[in-house]
Image (spheres, rainbow, N blue to C red):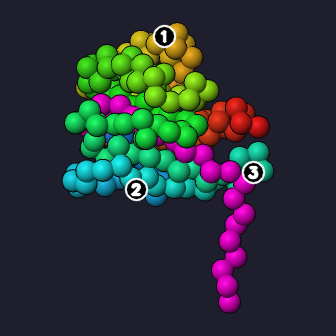
Amino acid sequence: QEYEHEKIDYVFKVVVIGDSAVGKTQILSRFAKNEFCFDSKSTIGVEFQTRTVTINGKVIKAQIWDTAGQERYRAVTSAYYRGALGATLVYDITKRASFDHVARWVEELRTHADSSIAIMLIGNKGDLVDQRAVPTADAVEFAEDQGLFFSETSALSGENVESAFFKLLEEIYKVIS
Ligand code: GDP
């Protein structure tokens, strides 16, 4: 018996960017596989994971790219951004510097990615409430200024990860349909 393949209506490429160690890989694993991996990764090189979801009755395969450590070497190239319809820009709510660098990452997107790219700003590690260094209001203001969507997540607990990606995918669908 052959497996029945679900018909895919769209493939959406989404890139995950932001400083090193903010939790990009963990957010991606949480969304794609509902996993949080306590081992640190060692792979260098661009990789992607996929998850197929239904939005407005359309079957959408999200192909989500991870820099897999390359951001440490300033090696994220325009090939990474090519064809991307969405981006999740991640900072760590416990690391002020990772939020201060968000403007630079937005600049990077404006330079290399398509101008219609939908951007979701994500403040990750929301579970570390006692170590918060970035007030939610600062991020809300920045996101409004720059026309970004915004969510605070925890890849560890899974809080808001699903909703942030769905919001982004819905916005991409609105742009392309
Ligand atoms: P990347 O370099 O941005 O891909 O970051 P990683 O996904 O490798 O995560 C960096 C570190 O932060 C790892 O030790 C993760 O276990 C940890 N981490 C990632 N997300 C969370 C989170 O939501 N909460 C907490 N407490 N730790 C996290």
Q: Earlier in the sequence, mark 1 or mark 2?
A: 2
Which circle marks residue 141 in the picture? 1
Count of numbered marks: 3
Please, what secondary structure does the residue beneath circle 2 have?
Answer: loop
Residue at the spot 61% in from the left edge and 27% down from the top edge: 116
> Relative to 107, is 67 above or below?
below
Q: Circle 3 sits on which residue?
A: 58
Amino acid at pointer 1: Glu
Three-letter residue code for mark 2: Glu
Residue 17's disc number = none
Residues at marks 1 and 2 touching, judged by CB atoms closer than 8 Å: no
Question: In the rendered structure, which amino acid carries the disc numbered 3?
Answer: Lys
> Helix, strand, or loop for circle 1?
helix
Magenta residues (range) = 1-22
Q: CA distance from mark 3 to mark 2?
A: 25 Å
Residue drawn at point x = 55 percent, y = 35 percent? 86
